Image (tube, rainbow, N blue to C red):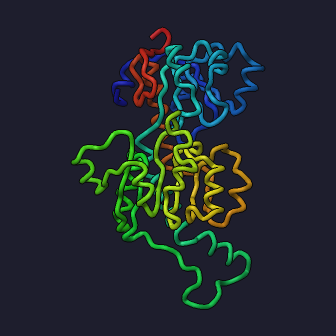
Amino acid sequence: MDRDQVDRVAPRRLQVLCWTRFPGPALDRLAANHDVRIEEDVSGLIADDPGYCAGVDVLAPVGVPRVDVHLLDAFPSTRLIASFGLGTDHIDLGAAAERGIGVTNTPGVVERPTAELTVGLMIGLLRRLREGDAVIRAGGWPKPGLESMLGLGLENSILGIIGLGGVGRQVARLATVFGMDVVYTQRHRLDAETERDLKAQYLGRDELLASADVVTLHCPMTPETHHLIDAAALALMRPSAFLINASRGPVVDEAALVAALRAGTIAGAALDVYEYEPRVSAELLELGNVFLTPHMGSATPAARAAMTDVLVRQIEAFATGAPPGHMVVSSKVSAPGS
C-alpha cells in the first residue's frame, strides 16, 4: 500500500511499544496518530506494568530482550512485530506464527551501507590500517625500508561471497569496481542473467572456501547457517586467505576462528558481528590479525532514518487493515477493530 492509500483509510489508533527511540522524523509521525511508548527496559516493564503490556498491539523490537515465547506471553494482544533491521534471529518466528502474529523487517535500505562497511573492513584488514593507526598513536613510525607495512591490494584477487542476497549483491558490485573476481555460493543458484549482471560465478561451498582470497559472509542466521564456518570450513581456506563477517555472529564458530587465526590456518579476519554479542571474546581482542567493529553495518544517519520510515509505514498500513510490507512471517494480520 502506498503513502496516498494509507492516508485515505481511517486507521485504528494502536498501542505501539518500541525498544528504543528510532532515528529520524518518522517515529514522531507515528506518535502523532498512535500511542507510542519507548521503553528500553522491556523486561522491567513486563514486571512492573503487566496491564499496559496486555493491551499492546504492535511490538517494535531491536536487539535485546529476545522476542521469545515467554515475552510473547506477556503481550497477548500483539498482532504485529515490526522489527527494526534486516535480521530477525532475535525473534522466535515459529512462536509468532503459532499465535497469528505477523513479523516484518526493514530491507531495501540497509544493503548499501552494510556492503560499504564490508568493503571497508576488507581494505582495512588487507592494507593493515589498524596496525598503521596503532603505530602512529603509540608515537612511532614504521621501520625504514620498502618492505615495511606491506599490505595486499584487492585487484585480481578472488572474492568468495556466501549468500548473494541484497547485501551480497551490493558487495559483488563494489568488488568488481576494485577489479576483484567474484564467486558465490548459496542454497539456490541464481539465474544466468543475474550472474552475468553481477559478474559472479557460482561454486559449491567447499570449492569457494578453497579458492577465494577473501571470504565474506552475507547469509541470514538460521539453524542451517549456525556455525556454517567451523573448524572444518576454516581448514579448507588458504593460509593466505581472509574471512569477513558482517552478517550474524553465530554463523562463525568463534572458538574455531580464534584457533585458526592463532595457528595460521587463515591469515586474518574482520568482524562486525560476534557470536555472543555484545560480548567480544578476550581471545579475539588479543589477536593482531583481526579487525573489529561494533555491529555498525547500517550505521549512517540516512540509513537508520530510512529504516525507521520503513518500519513506521508498515505499522501505518497495519492500522488500516492492509497487509504490512516486507513480511518475514506472513499471517492474516489486521489491526483490532479494523
**Residue located 39% across and 54% down the image:** 207
Could you say where residue 57 lies in the image, as x and y percent from the top left? 56, 17
Give left or right: position of 51 versus 302. right
Extreme left residue here? 193
Give the quadrant of residue 174. Answer: bottom left
Could you say where residue 282 lies in the image, as x and y percent from the top left? 74, 54
Give left or right: position of 38 versus 207. right
Give the quadrant of residue 28. Answer: top right
Q: Check the picture and name the quadrant holding the C terminus.
A: top left
**Residue located 52% across and 17% down the image:** 79
Could you say where residue 66 lies in the image, as x and y percent from the top left? 64, 30
Residue placed most toward the observer, 297 or 288:
288
Residue placed most toward the observer, 194 or 44:
194
Query: Can residue 300 be seen at all in this image of the molecule?
Result: no
> Looking at the picture, does residue 318 appear above or below residue 157?
above
> Looking at the picture, does residue 336 appear above or below residue 213?
above
Residue placed most toward the observer, 78 or 318:
78
Extreme bottom residue here? 145
Could you say where residue 281 lies in the image, as x and y percent from the top left? 71, 51
**Residue located 36% across and 55% down the image:** 183
